[in-house]
Image (cartoon, rainbow, N blue to C red):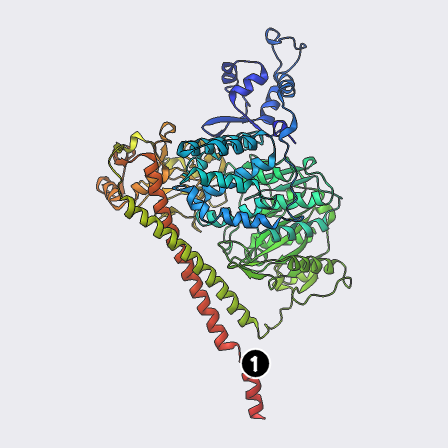
Amino acid sequence: MSTADHSDQLHSQAEIASLAGVSRATITQWRRAPGFPSSEGGGGSELFRRADVLAWLDARPIPRRLLQGDPEGTTFGARARRSRVRSTPPAADAPRPETPETQPDPRTADHVRELMGQLCDRVRGAGSRVDYVNLLVSLHFLRRSGGDHWNDIVQMSATGKGSDGSTALLKHIAAAVDEKLRLLGMRPAMHEALVRLEPRTYGDLRHVVRLVGELGPEAFVLMLDEYELLAGLDSGEFFTPRAVARVMVLIAEENRAADAPMGIYDPYARGGELLAAATAWSAQQGTAPRRMRVRGLTHGRDTAPLATMNLTLLGARPSVRVSSGAPPWTASGAFSAEQFDLVLSNPPFNMSDSTGEPRAEGGWPYGSPPQGNDNLAYVQHVLSTLREGGAAAVIMPNKAGNSANRSEKRIRQAMVERGVVKAVLALPDRLFSHTSVPVSVWFLVHPSQACDEIAFIDGRQVGTPVRGKRALQDDDVQALLDAYRGCLHPGDNEHNPAVPTAVVAKESIRERDWSLSPVDHIDTHKPCRSTSEAAHREALTILELRTQQAWDADATAAWALEQVEQQGALLDAVGWECVSLSDLCTIQAGPSYSLLKKHITTDGGVRLLYPQNLREGRLAELSDDRHVTEARARSLERFLLRPEDIVCVRTGAMGPPALVRDVGAGWLMSANVIRLRMDDEHRARVHPGYLAAYLGRPESVAWVRDRATATGAPSISAAALGNQPVLLPPYPEQQRVVAILDALAAQARAHIHLAEAVTHTRAAVAERLMTSDLDAATRLAGGGNS
C-alpha cells in the first residue's frame, strides 16, 4: 500500500487548492460556506481530512468559466480525484507486512537492550527518555516502510559531523516521519519530540541509526513496551498486554458467524494494541490486512502516531482518530455510524460503586447508564457497532459485573435476557503497568446470535510474576482458550483445575441479582497451603524490581546533580533575558460561572478543571469531578485545554501551576482557573516545562499571592498575572534545567513505588509467617487430643 493513496490522509489548504484547480483565496472563501470540513491543527498548520474534503467538493459543480477542459457538470470532487491519480507516485513506499511472531531474530532483543542502555542517556541529553523512544520508533518505521527516506537517513548519518549535523539529521528524520503520518491521516507529531534530543556526539547518533537498521520486525512491540514503561507514570495511561489482547481476539473469534472479519474497531484504542492483535491474527488466517477496515478512536495524542505506525507496518490501512473529547457514542463521535465484524476495547472505567441516577440524554437500548459512570455506556456502544454475526470483547472492572446500582442492574438484566453476553472471563490482577486493578473480559455477540446460557471462566490464578507484574505466557493463553472451548463443548477438553468454569442459565443469573461476575457463579475452592508462599515469592519479585528501578532513578538523579556541580547552576549570563509573562503567552481566564451553571452535569461529557485538580504542580482526576455537556463545551471551545498549556489557580488557594500533558488535554476550564498558552512565535524560545517549573518556584508563587486581591478569596487577574517577570535563559539551558528537574521528579516517583512495594512485601511476609503452617498445626493439635 502506498501512503499516498490513503483515503484518510490530511491535506493543507494549499494542497486542496492544487487538487481542485483553484486559488488559495477560493479555499478561504469556501471555508466560510456551510458544511465545509473543519480543520485539524498539526505541526503549526491547519490540515483537512481528504475524505471529508472530497465529499464536500462532490456536491459543488465547477462553474463554466473554471472548467479548464472538464466536461460540463463536472464537480470539484471529480477533478480533485483525477488530480490525485495523476500525482500519486508509484507504491514504492508500501510497507512490507510484518509478522513479528514468526521466527524472531534473537539479536533484535539484544539490540533494543543496547539502544535503551547508555546510548539512551548519551543521545537524549536534555530530552526525555520518551523523546528518545520516539526517535527509535520513527527510525524503525521509516526503515521498515521502504522508500528513499531510510537511504537518505543512512547517507546523512555517514557524512554528518558535530552538533549541527545531529540537529540536521534529527530534523530530517522528524520531517520524513511526520510527512508519512500526515499521508496516513495522522497529525504531525514527531518534530517537537525529536528536536529536544541533544546527542553528546554525532557518533552516538550514527550508532543508533546503525543498530535500528539491524532490527527485526518484532522490535516495534519491544519499543512500545519501553514507551509505556517510561510514559505511563506521567500520563496515567497504560496499554493492554499483548497476551491479554490475544486472548480477547481468540475467544471473540470463536463467537463470530462470518469466516473472516473485514471490519475491526476499538472505541478507546490506547496504543492500538488490540487492533494490532486482531490485524495480525486475521493475516495469519489468510485475510489481507489492506482489505480490512481498521478503525480506532484514541484520547492519547502521543500514542495515536504509534498505533498508526504499528498497524501500517502490519499491512493495514488504519484510520486512527484522536478524540475531540466527545464520547464515542455521541453523534459527533468518529465512526459512530459504522458497523463492524469485530470490536475490541479496553476503555477507561470507574472502579467505585455507581450511585448516580440514570442519565436523561442519549438513546440506550439496554437501559440508561447512571450519571458519572461510563462503564456500561461503553458496553452498549460496543454492542451498537456490531454488525449482524459480529462479536466483541470488552475489558470491564469486576465491580461492573455485580454493582448494586439499580440502573446498572437493569442494564445487565436486559443484556442477559436478550442473550448478548456470551461469556465473562475473570483475569488475574497486576496484568497492567502502573495499576493492580482486577478486571474481567466480557465477550458479547450481536442480538441475532442470542444465547440462553453464559460461560463464566475464573482465570485469576493463571500467569507468572514478571518485572513486578503478572504476565500470561503462551501456556496460560492456551489454558484460557481451552477452558472457554470446554464450556461450549463439555467433554471435548481435559479439565484444567487452575481455570474453573461454569455454564449458567438465565434463571440462575436472575437469582444472583443479574450478576455477571464469575466469582458469583463458580464455586471457589479453599486456597492450598502454598498460596501464602507463592504470594510471598511474588512480593519479593516486585520488591526487587522496584528496588532496581529506584537505584536506576537514583543514578540518573545523581548524574543530573553532578551536572549542576560541574557546570554550575548558571553557566553565565550571556543570552539571558528578563521578560514579562504576557510577552511569552496568551493568558486566558476561564469562562464565567453563568456560562456553565446550567450545563454542569455528572452525566459524562467534558470534564471541568477546578483548582482542586491542581496537586503539587500536577493535574489529577478526582472521583467527584464535574462535567459539562458536549454541546456547551463546543460553544466554549476557546476555553478547552491542549497539551503544553499551563494552568494556574485564578481564585482560591494559590499554589504551583501545572503543565497539561495527556491528563488535562481536552478538559474545559472552570471560572476559577487561568490558562497560559505559548504563542507560536515563542515556541522555539521557551520550553513549556521550563516555564511551568519557573512559575512553580516558591518565589514565583509568593509573587502571585502578594498580588492576589483578598476581598472574599484570593484572586489574580489575567492582566496582573501577565506582569510577572520571568528569567529566561537560552533554549539549550532551559532544556538542561528541565532534564535535571525531571530526573529528580522521576526519582521521587520511583521511591514512592518502592515504599508501596515494601508495604506489600511486609503484608505477604506476615501472611506466610502466620498461616503457612496452619494445616500442620491443626493436625498436630488433633493428634494431641486423640
- In this view of the protein, can residue 702 be seen by the observer? yes
Q: Residue furthest bottom?
A: 786
Q: Quadrant of residue 266?
A: top right
- In this view of the protein, can residue 368 be seen by the observer? no
Is 530 left, or right, of 289 in this rendering?
Answer: left
**Residue 392 x %, y %:** 66, 47
Q: Is 220 situated above or below 399?
A: above
Q: Residue furthest left?
A: 706
Q: Residue furthest top?
A: 65
Quarter of the image with the C terminus in it:
bottom right
Q: Is 263 situated above or below 395?
A: above
Residue on which the image places disc 1 = 775
| Nearer-the-camera pick, 221 or 786 | 221
**Residue 355 x %, y %:** 50, 54
For numbered disc 1, what is the local secondary structure? helix
Count of numbered circles on the image? 1
The amino acid marked with disc number 1 is: Asp
**Residue 156 x %, y %:** 50, 31
**Residue 708 x %, y %:** 24, 40
| Nearer-the-camera pick, 79 or 192 | 192
**Callout 1: few (<14), some (14-19), or many (20+) C-alpha neighbours within 10 Å?**
few
| Nearer-the-camera pick, 120 or 45 | 120
Quarter of the image with the N terminus in it:
top right
